[in-house]
Amino acid sequence: MENILKSKNLGDTNLVESRLTGYSQVVMVPPLGILFTTEYFMSSGLILTLLFMAGQVQQPASDIARLRELLADKKQPQLQAQAAYSILQQQTPLATETVRQYLRDPRNVEVFTAFAGAIKLRRDGRFSDELIDALSIELNIVRQAACEALGASADGKAAFKLKQIAENSSQEESLRIQAMAALGKTGRKNAAETLLNLLADPKPGIRMASRSALAEIVGEDLGRDHAAWQVWFDERKNLSPEAWLEERLAQRNARLTRLDGELDSLRTRNRTLYQQIYVRLGPTEKIPFFQGLLDHEDPAVRILLAGWLSEAMNEESFRKPAGEMLLNFSRDTVEEVRRQAVLGMGRCNDKACLDRLLLIIQSDQISVRAAAARSLAMQAKGNDGAARMVLVLPALQNALADPALEVVVEAAEDLGSLGVPAAVPLLAGLLRHKAVAVRKTAAQALERIADISVLEELMAGLEDPDIGVRLGVLGAVSRAVNQAKVIKEDDRLRLQSRMEMILLKDPDAGVRARSATLLGDFGTPMHLLNLWKAAITEGDPRIQEKSWQAFLEILSRSKDMKLIHEWNLVVRREAPLRRVNFLVELLAKMQPSGMNPKIELAPVRELLVQCGIENQKWLPAWSALRELPQALEPEDVERRLSLLLQIAEIALKEQAAPDVLQMVDFARPLFVGRKKLQADFEELYRKANFITGTKN
């Protein structure tokens, strides 16, 4: 027997098509979804399942004979419930008579309970007489089904009949009890009054049944004391029918809220137990454990399972069964389960998973489409990624035009992570998107793959009002310039001018700091002045630091000693405390191009030696002097020794005796013919030795 259930989103409604052996029905339901269950009553009277269909039902006239065949199929309880509901909703004379026939023959328990459940759901009061007759049936499951249906569907006439049965002392006690239970489920005020009177019945069974039914109406059991029930009713007996029902509804809602909370707690505990079981499983136990949870009724457990299946994809032996289960979950009725499964499918290299992802990225659920975009990017990065890229890239490109921003942002980020040159112009085009989130993601993606071909779009992006976008575009500009083999001179001049303008005028300190870094990458000595001003002007420390580093970068790259001397004087005049650091950092950044770096960097080191002595900074001066090339002329040797003596004297004042001893040893080979300097150094050596001995 064919039972096909298909669900498709159509705007704000779901279209559910159910083909039942040639019988077709179409149900339009709200976007909250459809919950299909079937209400059956076992000997204990508990509800196992109820076919619940919400919304406006539209269907053609059905073949009653065919639906009767479905009703007779005891192995398909859900189909029985669907058939019963379908017959009940037609309201034609033939359908109505069919329902009456089945309700008058309660021997077919499954069909009777299916119709009773449908009557309860539709609150259909046409069959109250048949249901009241069923209250006297010996089968407990039939009586309970009839009682539930009457409680939901009884009109004034049926309620009066139930009242007569309940109050008739000549009736069988079991029938009176069932009538009272049905009255309690109606929630009516006159039913409460009838039940209140029956609390004084001489039969204990009747009193207990009345109390139980009243508790159904009130929402709690007030005990055996008749006075307590009477006080409760007296406080409400003057309420209008509407006010009475509003109070009953509020009480029921409060109970539902409490039960929902308790159910959530139990589900949370259940999930915790499953997690504890999972961490204790051995490798061979995992797949059977996963298979046992595939059809779990709690969506949260299925979400957990989807995550575990994703983890299992890391192990070769689990990949195939885990991939098949994730494929199964990608069709789950709960969106979050589908999303988690789709995310896990990105690790599965199976072609079925790829085909499914290419289909899902066009689905109706936004979060699922976004997850599919991410998984497709993962597929393109895995084994055989080049072959898959042919299919993945067009899908991600199409996703850039998706109406949902979440999907566009994810697709843009994924294209950037793939590093595909073909995506560069697409992402550059997104810099004009109206949504800030999309522009920002596109800019961040371009930081990884931008090239000089999109320079115009990047220049336009520097005008974006959003700080995050401008920062990302600056990063993309940096990559494009650094990766370019050749840059047109006009483009270079425009970039330099734009970076300088941003440094001076952009309202955000972070953007200005980043523009300073870029200016340091491709700026020229003509930009040194503005960088210097930005470095020494009080303001945001980020701007000062980045401008200072860019200033040193350009100056070191120039290797122009005349220019270095000029700026050494400027630093000495305008920021004397930074002069030593200026020369130290400049020396560290300068990369000699010749074969003898000592000779090439000697002028800067000599400046550092002199600056260190002037500023009483002996350590950088001593380090620079040691790296100077060997002096050949006598006057140069004498000058070098004189400088070293000054450095040693400063070091001795600071109790750096071991370093002074090293300086004297360094100078000894040069003492020949220089007795005065030799004596001065020997005196320093004696003092340093004394300090060292004292410390020891």
Image (cartoon, helix red, strand yellow):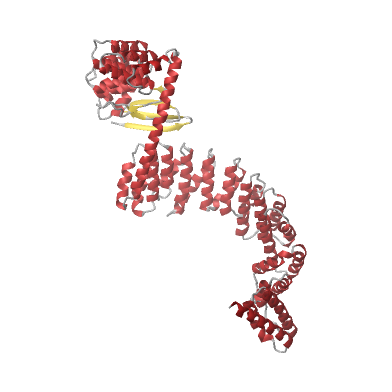
* Side (left or right) of 122 relative to 490: left
Percent position (x, y) of residue 380?
A: 46, 51
> Above or below — where is 520 with respect to 430?
below
Image quarter (top left, top right, bottom left or bottom right) of the N terminus? top left
Residue at 36% of width from left, 29% of height from top?
A: 36
* Residue 104 is at least partly visible in this image: no
* Side (left or right) of 404 relative to 236: right
Instruction: Identify which residue, 369 or 65, lies in the foreground.
Output: 369
Instruction: Identify which residue, 380 or 537, lies in the foreground.
Output: 537
Instruction: Identify which residue, 458 or 135, lies in the foreground.
Output: 135
Percent position (x, y) of residue 342?
A: 43, 44
Instruction: Identify which residue, 622 or 676, lies in the foreground.
Output: 676
Percent position (x, y) of residue 474?
A: 63, 52
Percent position (x, y) of residue 188?
A: 38, 15
* Residue 18 is at least partly visible in this image: yes
> Above or below — where is 56 with respect to 691?
above
* Side (left or right) of 554 relative to 365: right
Image quarter (top left, top right, bottom left or bottom right) of the C terminus? bottom right
Residue at 70% of width from left, 77% of height from top?
A: 649
Residue 111, quarter of the rendered image: top left
Question: Which residue occupies the extreme bottom position in the image?
Answer: 673
